[in-house]
Every structure is written in structure tokens, then in C-alpha cells.
Amino acid sequence: MTPFDSALAFVLEHEGGFVDHPEDPGGATNQGITLATFRRWARRHGHHTPTVDELKAIPAATVRAIYRDDYWQAVLGDELTPALALITFDMGVNAGPDRAVRILQQTVGAIVDGKIGPQTISYARREGDDPATLDEITARRLHYYGQLGHFGTFGLGWARRTVAARRAAEAIAVAG
């Protein structure tokens, strides 16, 4: 199983099926893919604008393609250590790739600009999958969520997912 496959399996385990929670700023979502994300992806690939019903029936291959194109590649998951890739990718899905990259950059001491480049990759590889690094990125992720206005509604779920990502990342690091 590739690092992307492992990370995607983790995300899909935590995202679930179709939801349209009135307090979720993402709106209609299926398997973690918002309708807006699905529509952007479809436009880029020359498809018609999907409907909510099409989001409800989104094919697994499309879900995988969106996650690879819009999230994994956005955080350069193939360039990171597998454990940091899982955590950064998962946060990118939940809070946007830019925010996830900023938190990774803060964690590893790189310039914080939200754009993953050679310095961020180098610093992330230097830090590797050290438990202290995994703890730091986890703490920063939790801190970010705690500042959000809808933390009262979704915070416990975000915290559980963040802790689960930390555990999964450590399992990957130990196995690697």
C-alpha cells in the first residue's frame, strides 16, 4: 500500500457518507468532498457542473482523483515522510491544504507561507517522523481548531480525528 493509499484510507474512515449539517460552512459533503470542491474539480476536467444528487452518488474513482489532485499533491505528500504526509494530508482535507502546509511549516521551522517548496520538504525530512515532531504538529492542529467559531459544534470530532491521525502516523513511522 502506498503512502497515499494509507492516508486516503484513514481519511475515508473518518469522513463517512453524505452530510449537509446546517452549521458546517462546507455545506453538502460526501466522503469529505464538498459540493464546491466537486464542482471545481469537474470544471477543471471539462465536466458539467455536478448537482447535490450527483455528489450523493460520487464514484469512488472520482473521490480518489479529487483527493489525489486537490489535497495529496497540494501538500506534496509523496515528498514528505509517510507519517507527516498522513497528518498533513488529513488536515488539508479538513481545513484546506494551505492551512495544513502552514501548520507543517510552523512545526518544522520553515518559512510560513502556505506554499510547500524545497525548504519545507527539507525541514520536514530532517525532522522525520520523530514522536516529538508528531506531537508538535498535533498540538498545533488542535490549537487551530480551538480558535474556530464552530468548535463548539464540531470540536470534539476534530479532536478525536486529530488524535487518531497522530496514532496512525506513529504506527506508520514505527512500521517504516
Image (cartoon, grey):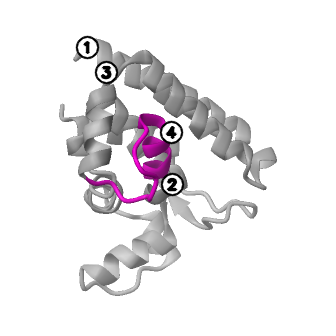
Type of the residue with mark 4:
His
Type of the residue with mark 2:
Arg
Report if residue 2 lies within the magenta region. Answer: no
Question: In the shown orientation, is residue 88 left or right of residue 46?
Answer: right
The answer for how far apart the CA atoms under marks 2 and 3 are is 23 Å
State yes or no: discs 4 and 3 in contact (Cβ < 8 Å): no
Foreground residue, 106 or 1? 106
Residue at x 43%, y 58% (from the top left corner): 114
The answer for how far apart the CA atoms under marks 1 and 3 are is 5 Å
2 up-or-down from 57: above or below: above
Q: Residue furthest right?
A: 152
State yes or no: discs 1 and 3 in contact (Cβ < 8 Å): yes
The answer for how far apart the CA atoms under marks 1 and 2 are is 28 Å
Q: Position of residue 18 (x, y in %)?
A: 54, 57
Question: For numbered disc 4, what is the local secondary structure?
Answer: helix
Question: Earlier along the polypeptide chain: callout 4 or callout 3?
Answer: 4
Foreground residue, 65 or 106? 106
Q: In the rendered image, which quarter contains the N terminus?
A: top left
Where is mark 4, residue-wise?
Answer: 14
Question: For numbered disc 3, what is the local secondary structure?
Answer: helix
Instruction: Classify residue 9 by image quadrant.
Output: top left
Type of the residue with mark 3:
Ile
Between circles 2 and 3, the one closer to the viewer is 2
Q: Position of residue 26 (x, y in %)?
A: 60, 65
Q: Position of residue 27 (x, y in %)?
A: 62, 67
The segment highlighted magenta reads: 100-117
Instruction: Classify residue 171 by image quadrant.
Output: top left
Where is mark 2, residue-wise?
Answer: 99
Where is mark 1, residue-wise?
Answer: 175
